[in-house]
Every structure is written in structure tokens, then in C-alpha cells.
Image (spheres, rainbow, N blue to C red):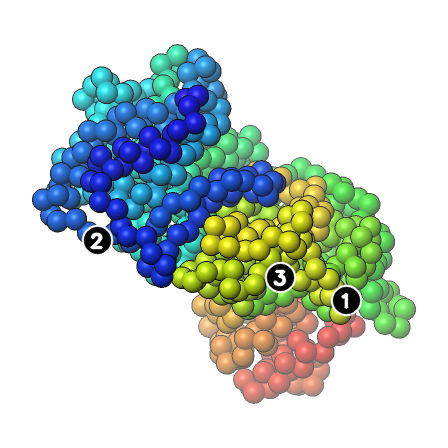
Amino acid sequence: KSGGGGSSWASKLAKGLFGKKKAPKKKGDGLGMLVNTSDVSRMMASGSSEATPIAVDRAQQKPAAKGRRRLDVRRVGLVAPLLSTLVSRWGGGGLYNVVSRARLGDEGAASQSVEPSMLSVLNVLSFSGKMLPLLWAHVGGLDSGTASELQGFLADAPGRGALAEVDFSCWGGRDSEALASVSLFACLLSNTLMLTDDDEILHRERPLPLHHIRRVIVLFKKFMHRAITDGGGGRENWTFWGLSLINSIRKVLGDLYARSSRTPLCSSELWLVEGHEDVERRVKNGRRIEDLNAVLNSPLMRVMPFGVNLRTRMMLFGRMVRCVREAVQGVNEMGTLRPGRRVRIHRGRVLESGLELMNSLGSGLRERIVVNYINDAGVEEKGIDVGGLFKDYWSDLSAVAFSPGYSLFASAEGGALYPSPSSLSAHGKQDALKLFTFLGRIVGKALFENITVQPVFAHFFLSFMRGSYNYNNMLNDLGVCDPELYKNLIFLRDYEGDAEDLCLSFTVGEDDFGAGREVELVEGGGKIDVTNDNKLKYIHLVAKHHMSDRIRLQSEAFVKGLGEVIDRSWISIFNEQELQILISGATNGRLDVEDLKRNSRYAGGYVGMDRNVTNFWKVLEELDPHHQRLLLKFVTSCERAPPLGFEGLDPPFTIQRIGISNDGDKLPSASTCFNVLKLPTYSSKSVLKAKLLMAITSNTGFEMS
């Protein structure tokens, strides 16, 4: 533990396992000499940019002969109990039970964080080139006896004890070698993934081919489900072996699921665990906030929420928000609706009016906001706000506030938004941070009121919203934010020649409204050349500068405002892609007319087979996506369907019959408070279409009612 020769010792062990022959080290061979920067990544995650990387050779080696490979697999199995014991005790994962949220009784039995010498061991074993594939062959091989033992262990939960109690030391019993191999594999895979970008997994089959990664997911989710459902045993019987096994597996699953939010690694069904339907039943039966909180805080939802399908998790979020909203605001149908806070909004100044009147409310934004609109002529519009006017205002406000033209948000490739690095200069630091806090409250209030808004946010910014940004993903996220810079950094990473020939230093250039300046990535960075030995450190520092340093204050202000309205634990059960669906609904551009039709009601004498009703649905099918969104906004104040589809629209979309004598009497109108379209009885489909388009494109308030 106290020795500094962990790396040397591990290297000798690797030679003993895999033979002494080394791959030749020569310039231009494979990827050449790269720097393992898992320790750099760890330091960056804690906010530091200083670390001492360990050089390792990741050059590809020739595959061993079949007989030799079997021997290597067996050797790995034999030393796994010893290696996994070392890693479990001093690797930093054997002290805390993430399922039970309690520490090991004997806190001196394991280290709280990874020991420096053990980090060296982990690095050498992770990047030796053979250890991970051989461990996986030992653990997951279809003809492997170890795989059969593991399946038996997972199937015989009562007979084998709790996972947190396992002892896979060299003298630990019938399952020791199999479980030790799983634990060591999980720990090394977790360490390797810290330094593996998405491109390597998807296209280069590193650290394992993608179809094997899927098998890892299937095996590991069974282990985590076992840890969640076996009761945990008695705390006095927990071992650092068991806790390290659970923590390592959880880290691997969390990392792979986070990557799936950028580019799916497998189908969503593959993540689901056995018995996830029970969670859906509990959510549907939950009537009180206490019942729903019990589901939210259950081990399954805390440790691996992705084991439950997205629909159930969104239903849980919706019901929790509704319970809190009704407790704060009251319910109109029950006669308990509270008066709320009244605000007067000028249609031409929606952002300024909102900032002036509501930014000081903080968590008071959970209360009911009653909106009165002032039109461009300075006259108060006729409309009683029972929710519809507020939805209309909040949609208009989000459209203005998140426009890149306002210089608060920048647009990445594809239109995804993230805080503009120039926003502090454009608005002044104090005013800019005040605006970002307000915008966080806007998004929080939209989620609280079940209002879908238009902004689509960049993946990494959604991670900040969740409060769980993984700094090891900075390079991957840079590929979304700045594809050209990402390609240049990948070129540097894979460059086979001498990096000094590229004449780079530890600096980056910035353009702030035409004023160029040079920023040092480390102190004295302008005098430090980028070399083959430090180029990975340079790459990660450039990614950190662009993905964190330049927008950290803006992101923190936004997240602060969001957290004042929405409890962070409510959105922690979603990944980034799912959170985006929660904010702006699921849509591919076109309206799902069949879904809307299935969940619509009729009033005033209309029925589903009425000629005017069937003409309306035909017209809606014929409209282009833009006009479909305008119609939906005309009726509901929101351009997008709710996250769970139109069955989640409350009140339901309703078409009300308005009798007329001739076609020129009335245009269609709407009651957005109740999602009602008031559709006159027009003489033909062509007239209905013309009148409907005139109404939804007029861009007026309540004058037509």
C-alpha cells in the first residue's frame, strides 16, 4: 500500500501472465506512445488541471494462438482473487454501499479514495492490451465454466447471500474466483472507459466490440438488480469485496447509459430489469406525495433508474409535480383555486416585463401566475386567465429568451443551445448572470406547469441541469459543440509523428466580439510546447476550457434558478436525451394526428363521425409541420405534444360545435385554458381549411373571440 513501485510490480505481473515479449516501440507504429491520463481526468473532475500522467504503450499486439489464449484466460482466473482483493481494498470503492447509502462498519478496512500506488496498478492492468479481453473471456465466454457459475449465483439469490456480503478472497469459498473475476473486470473496465471516447467504442471496438458491450450490460444489470433486491444483508456482514463489486458495476452501467444518451449503444429495452412493471403499478396507485416519494427514493430509482422504462419515470415525474402544484395552487374543479399573483405583460416586451415582475419571486414561482396581456395599442386584452393565458405567455417568453440573437445562448451544430461564452461581455457580468438565473426559473416553471417549450439544449448543458456533469465526457461533448475543433484534437491524439512539429503550445485563442486574445491553459502555457508525452493533457485542457471554464458561471446561475422551482431529485432519474423530451416533448417534426385523435373529446353537439369533425382531421393531416404546430399552439398555447403524448394533455383536446348560418359568420377560435377548439359548422372541407389557416396565422390575442 505504502510503496511507490505499484506500476513496476503490475508490469512484472502482466509479463508473467502474458509472456515477456514486448511489441516493438518505433515511431509511426500503430498509435505510438500515448499518455494514459485517467489520473488527469480524475483531477479535472475535481476542478484541478495539474496531474502527472503515466506513459503506457497502447500499441496493438498480435492475437495469441488458441491454446495460448486458453492458458492466459486460466491464468487470469487464478490471479483474479489476489488482484481484486488489492483493488477492492485500496481502489476507493470498498467503503460505501450505494444501495443502502451507508458506510462499511469497519471504516479502516478499505481506503476512502484510490491510493496512488493502486492507481498505477489499475492503469497498467487496464491498458496492458490483454487483461480486459482475457477477463471478459473468462467471465462472459459462452463456453466458460465461470459464466455458468455466475448464472447460478444470480439465479440462487437466497442461497448465496447478499451481494454486499460476498468474500472472494483466495480462501473465500465456492464463488470466490468467479466473483473476483467479475469485480476485477468491472473495475478495470470502469477505469478504461474514463479514457475511451465514443468513436473508439462505436467504430474501433475499444475496449471491447460493441456486441460484447451489450452482453456486459445484460450481465451487469442482473448483478445490480440482485444487489438492489437481496436486502443487502446485515451491515455487520458487509465486506469491502462486495461493496467494491457493486460500486464498480454501477459505474460501468452509468457510464455506458450516459453514452447511450449521445449515441444509442443498444435498444432501450435492453436496459430494463426484471420486475420493472411493479414500479409502474406503484406509480399508478400513488395518490399522495408520500407514496410517490417512496418510489422516487427506492433503491432501484436511485441506483439504476434506467432499469425502469421511460414512460413510467415520466409518469412518476408528472404525478409528483401535479401533487405539489395542487397543494400550492389549489384545484379549480374543487373550488380551492387560490387567487395567485397577477402580472400585466406587454406583448412587445415579454422578456422585459417578466424579468421586472417575476425574477424576484424565486421559489414563489410555484404559485399560480395570473397573466393579463396588454396589446400593441396599449389596451388590455379580453381574457380571463385560468391557465391558458399563462401558458401562452410562457411559450412566448421562452421563444424570445432563448433566441441566439439575444446573445445569451449560442447555437451548436444542429441548433442545440448552450450558454454563449460571450454573454458576460454582451450584457455585463452581473446582468447576464441575473438573466441566466431567470431563464433557469422559466424552464423550471414550464416543467412545473407541464408546459412544453421550444428550446432544444446541447447535451452537455443538459448534464449541467441534471447536476451530474461528468468531466470525463468533455471531449465527446466538444464533438457536438464544435465539430471542427474536435476533429483537430482527434487528429492530434492519433498523430503518429512528432507532435512538436505542429508548433502548438498550451494556449487557446478566443474571439470576443472581434477582440482576439490568447488564454493560457496552465500557468506559463505560452512557453510550454505540446509534445507526444503531454499531448493528451493538452487535449483534455482544451476541451475543459471550451466545455466548462468559459460557461461555468452562466451554467451555475441557470441551474440555481431551475432548482428554485424544480427539485433536482425529480429530474435525476432521466438522462440528457430524456430530460430534453421532458422539456420540449417528443416530436420528429410532424404532429402525431392519430394520437391526438385517439385522445380528443367532442362537445356542443359534435361526435366523432360528424362531417365537420372528419373534415377537420383530414385538413390537419394535410397541413405541413409548421402549420400543425401553429394549430396546436392556437388551441393549447404549446407547439409540442406533452412528453407522454396527447393522453398527458390536461384538460384533453376538445372540439366544440359552433353553429353558424353561413360561412362568413365566424372564424375558428379557442379557449386555451381548457384546450378547446371552437369549430364553426362550415359548408365544406375547403372552407374549413381556409378559415382555420386564417385563424391560426393571424397572430392576434383574444380579439377574434
Q: Which residue is mark 3?
A: 417
Residue hosting label 1: 515
Q: Nearer the viewer, mark 3 or mark 2?
A: 2
Query: Is disc 3 in contact with disc 2, using a CB cutoff of under 8 Å?
Result: no
Viewport quadrant of the C terminus: bottom right
Could you tell which of marks 1 and 3 lies nearer the N-terminus? 3
The label on residue 62 is 2
Residue located 59% across and 43% down the image = 49
Residue lying at 64% horizontally and 48% vertically, measured from the top left: 522
Tell me the residue at 23%/20% (across/down).
170
Task: Find the distance from the CA under tag 3 to the CA under tag 2.
Answer: 45 Å
Q: Position of residue 330 (x, y in %)?
A: 69, 41
Q: Position of residue 665 (x, y in %)?
A: 71, 82
Q: Nearer the viewer, mark 1 or mark 2?
A: 2
For residue 577, above or below residue 161: below
| Secondary structure under the numbered disc 3 in the rendered image | strand
Residue type of the residue flagged with mark 2: Lys
